[in-house]
Image (cartoon, rainbow, N blue to C red):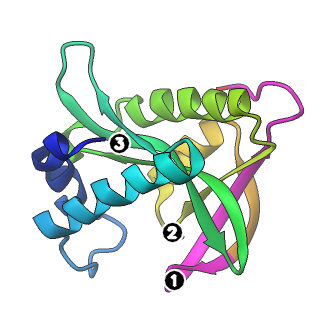
Amino acid sequence: MVPGDLDDVTAVLSAPDPVRVDRRVRTRTDAERWIAWNQRNYAEHGFGLWVVETHDGSFVGDCGLTVQDVEGEDHVEVGWHVMPQLRNQGLATEAGAAVRDHARDLGVAHLVALVRPGNVPSVRVAAKIGLHLERHAWVHGGDALVLGVDLTRGRPDP
């Protein structure tokens, strides 16, 4: 993810959230911060979010690894955002499975996804890539489902 991705990142981050309809609309400035945050993630952790594209180069969204504080404990998280018109086509699942496998290759022992309660599509994606509900937590000012998988026990079924 680089500054040249700003228009696409702005589009995906500012898309309506079907679960958090009261969420503040994210701006171009928010997208600039998002890209900068991901560049810091790569510098500090060796990973971050990837820009996801179709084989023909069309922008889909982002997906990758970040470090998230979950009630005072750092966890490696797989996360994704998909453009609204491309949702429900399996693209987040495909990208999420690739990221999960990359996390295992990096030596990540435990992977989580933080999903807002009610975000059924993201819960389904997490389940399809082998993550299971571990607990509820308070993350980034709201309730979150912590879905996780132990990556040291072989490959979960996608």
| In the depicted structure, whether residue 6 falls above or below residue 37 | above
Q: Quadrant of the N terminus?
A: top left
Label 2 element class = loop
Instruction: Give the labeled residue for mark 3.
Output: 62
**Badge number at residue 142:** 1
Upstream in the sequence, badge 1 or badge 2? 2
| In the depicted structure, whether residue 113 falls above or below residue 59 | below
In the displayed orientation, state which residue is furthest to the top: 55
What crowding class fits label 3: few (fewer than 14 Cα within 10 Å), some (14-19), or many (20 or more)?
Answer: many
| In the depicted structure, whether residue 118 falls above or below residue 124 | below
Q: Which amino acid, by three-letter code, is at mark 2?
A: Arg
Q: Quadrant of the C terminus?
A: top right
Q: Is residue 81 magenta?
A: no
Q: Distance between the residues labelled 1 and 2?
A: 8 Å
Upstream in the sequence, badge 1 or badge 3? 3
Q: Give the range drawn in magenta.
A: 137-157
Residues 29 and 83: in front is: 29
Residues 105 and 63: in front is: 105
In the displayed orientation, state which residue is furthest to the right: 153
Comparing labels 1 and 3, the label whose residue is closer to the camera: 3
**x 20%, y 60%: residue:** 32
Q: Distance between the residues labelled 1 and 3?
A: 22 Å
**Badge number at residue 116:** 2
